[in-house]
Image: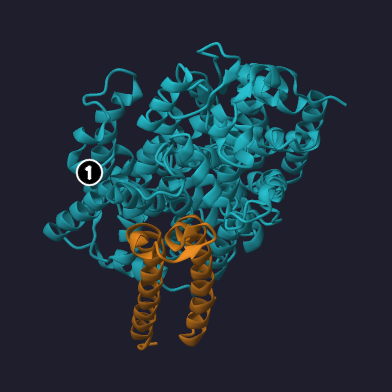
Amino acid sequence: MAEEPQNNNAYWAANVRIILISLVIWATVSFGFGIILRPLLMGISVGGADLGFWFAQQGSILVFLGLIFFYAWRMNKLDAEFGVEE
Amino acid sequence: MDQYTLNLLVVGASFALYIGIAVWARAGTTAEFYAAGQGVPPVMNGMATAADWMSAASFISMAGIIALAPAGGYTQSSFLMGWTGGYVLLALLLAPYLRKFGKFTVPEFVGDRFYSKGARLVAVVCLIVISVTYVIGQMRGVGVTFARFLEVSTDTGLYIGAAIVFAYAVFGGMKGITYTQVAQYCVLIVAYTIPAIFISLQITGNVFPQLGLLGSYAPTGGDVAFLAKLDQVVTELGFTQYTSYTTSTLNMVLFTMSLMIGTAGLPHVIIRFFTVPKVADARWSAGWALVFIALLYTVAPAVGSMARLNLTTTFWPNAVEGNALDGDAISLEQINTNPELSWINTWVNTGLLAFEDKNGDGMIQYYSEGSANMQAIAAERGWAGNELTRIDNDMMVLANPEIAALPGWVIALVAAGGLAAALSTAAGLLLAISSAISHDLIKGSINPNITEKGELLAARISMGFAIVLATWLGLNPPGFAAQVVALAFGLAAATIFPVLMMGIFSKRVNKEGAIVGMLVGLISTSVYIFLYLGWFFIPGTATYENIPANWLFGISPLSFGTIGAILNFGSAYLVSGLTKAPPREIQDLVESIRVPKGAGAATAH
């Protein structure tokens, strides 16, 4: 069992990496496309408005959904890889 | 059958269902009372979380806030992104680890992780302030909905609502609340989407409101995009273009962030993740919760924008085909005689809508007085100001079925849906308050030797008291509900979220750091809000006028939760760095909550 702490540390590092990637996407679609970058995306029109408007009112919510399910799926796989699942 | 009887039948049937479920799912143990015995499957827990989360504000107010925003509908997108984006933070940063920790309340985690009764007590104070301020809005929502649909006074409505919550929350505990919330979710989502589908079909010809929002305007044959039509109609009347960009990117970013981390820090939402059997289920459960929330949240901007166009073209009939100002405004005679417009007087009676024929021309001109262009037109045509003097945000969703002339049963359904949204959130908040009192205060501090039966009784009694307090505050609300909710989110963002995150992601943050951090977040955020919105929300006590010129670095009090959270993180790390590292067993505890293996059932310890 001497390897367990090392195994757990590697598991945690992998988890933190997945979290960071997910949070970058989370911030890009909402704060990025939805708010700060909207003026740059004004040229791309989406049904009567622009891409930034769509991300602010619809798109970011759909991406959030995808992110949570991706994380749950990816972590369950990671749990199994490291043998730490319940 | 008249509308009143229909409302009574539908609302009565929904209440009978809730009480029936509560009797079936009575809680017998503290584990059932606090965490539904950890036996709730993820999909069902997601549904209950969605009902728990979506309050009177989401159901009744949000679409109207977006639709009628003076700076344009886009600027209120913060609510849409903020109230859903918080679930990403919950799913990734908090829920799985708190479930692994396997206790019943948020303060209990804080107390154990920071090995300190003091830290636990500070967390209890934050939790109670957050939940009590939040529950006031729900009780008001119940009162207002009753008043409109069941022709009782707002106060009587509040008493009826409190009695219903008492019946199923006190006896059922988390178990009763969870299964009731599943039913309440079904009622509220059906009530929200049916009128939305009808209105989307009318305006855009698309059965899905989410696609209708991007679709074309159907009444003129579909050559114009719906949002372009809306922009054209509102700007013609001098209002800000609906899709126009924000004037303060900084505040929009900070406000969205405050709502996101505030959502992730709301205790009544967090405790929902204690009810699932496994860590993996906590992860899935957050996803399912957002699926059910997104069903309403992606529809809300469509409902808001379509209701705004519907309302405007009702007052300017010519706007349907061409330009509003090429024709006359709606006449008083029309309002009083046309049966399709009878809703206008119905809503005037509730006080949520008001008009006044200022220039006595027998017509009601609805336009923006602030616009220079409109002032010129008004002078030329002899108008004496905007004559649609009040449109309440809350009216947009509640009156939607009537504006769109939908059948009576849809109107009754909306009444039941509004009540379901308010009651389910109130029950979740009351449970969070009662478990903090009975489990953290009484069992955790005052009488650790209390028996299981004694604690269960204490939990029920504190729930009873919490309901009485919430009812009293609902009858005598301090300030405006919106300001009070801003405080709840600001505080959740500045206190609970940072302390939980540091407890999981740092082994170095110690008890001194956690306590100082929470106090800094609590005090800085509440003081900043009180400075501009009145001390303890007592009208007239604000130190500075609430205008952008007075704000520190231009940060609105509503957006301050993000700053409070940064101050909390900063001071906690600083103080922890200057004091002793946490003991070995605490560092081991952190190690163990990071790994799913061996979660088992929660223990009362």
Residue B561 drawn above or below residue B384: below
Q: Secondary structure at mark 1?
A: helix
**Residue B46 on image: x %, y %:** 60, 57
Of all chains in the rendering, the one displayed in orange is A
Residue B322, percent from left and from top: 59, 42
B584 or A17: nearer the eye? A17
Residue lying farthest to the right in this orientation? B1
Quarter containing the N terminus of chain B: top right
At which x and y percent is residue A40?
Answer: 34, 64
Query: Would residue B572 be found to the left or right of residue B295 on screen?
Result: left
Chain B tint as drawn: cyan
Tag 1: residue type?
A: Val
Q: Residue B307: name its quadrant.
A: top right
Instruction: Specify the quadrant of the image occupied by residue A11.
Output: bottom left
Q: Is residue A85 visible?
A: no
Position of B55 relative to B544 (above/below) = below
- State the residue position of label 1: B520
Identify the residue at image location x=38%, y=68%: A23
**Residue B104 in the image, given as x and y percentages of width and height:** 50, 52
Q: Chain of mark 1?
A: B
Q: Does residue B102 sit above or below B596 in this rendering?
A: above
